Image: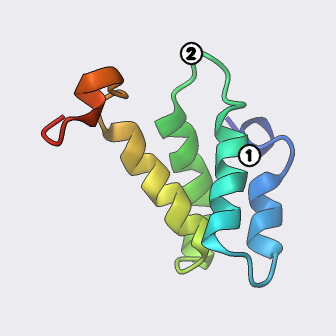
Amino acid sequence: MNMKQIDPRGLFEDSYLIEGITEGECRSIFLDWAIGIPVGQDPKAWIKIVLHQYQPKNPDHPMTKVLSEGLGAVNKKGRRGGRKGREIDG
């Protein structure tokens, strides 16, 4: 799989080119991209490919941080709703 398939709109490429982009703006871009991942695809694998493309030259960029956090979020258990979701011990 290549970057054109993973990021057809070029959201990540553009975000890494925007000087002074904030972490909040990167989160918004990431979420916009993430909701477009086709059902049945592995978001973790896609995030790893994007990180492999951009992280080496941009280790301190806010998008790199957001992608890394997104990768960690994929590793967590699924969403808990209702009363169980509000409990401190989960």
Q: Residues within 10 Å of mark 2 (few under 14, many from 20)?
A: few
Which residue is painted at 41% across and 38% down in the image? 74
Q: Residue furthest top?
A: 40
Judged from the image, the secondary structure of the residue bearing numbered disc 2 is: loop
Q: Decide which of 7, 56 is in the foreground and name it.
A: 7
Q: CA distance from mark 1 to mark 2?
A: 18 Å
Q: Quadrant of residue 7?
A: top right
Judging by the rendered image, the residue that carries numbered circle 2 is 40
**Amino acid type of the residue that numbered disc 2 sits on in the rendered structure:** Gly
Which residue is painted at 61% across and 70% down in the image? 23
Q: Residue furthest left?
A: 89
Judging by the rendered image, the residue that carries numbered circle 1 is 3
**Amino acid type of the residue that numbered disc 1 sits on in the rendered structure:** Met
Which residue is painted at 71% across and 65% down in the image? 25
Judged from the image, the secondary structure of the residue bearing numbered disc 1 is: helix
* Horizontal and vertical percent position of residue 84: 23, 25
Q: Residue furthest bottom?
A: 20
Quadrant where the image shows the C terminus: top left
Judge from the rendering whether residue 61 lies leftward or rightward of residue 65; answer left or right: right
Q: How many marks?
A: 2
Q: Quadrant of residue 32?
A: top right
* Horizontal and vertical percent position of residue 70: 48, 49
Q: Is residue 44 above or below residue 82?
A: below
Q: Is residue 17 above or below residue 76?
A: below
For the residues carrying marks 1 and 2, which lies nearer the camera in this image? 2
* Horizontal and vertical percent position of residue 6: 71, 39
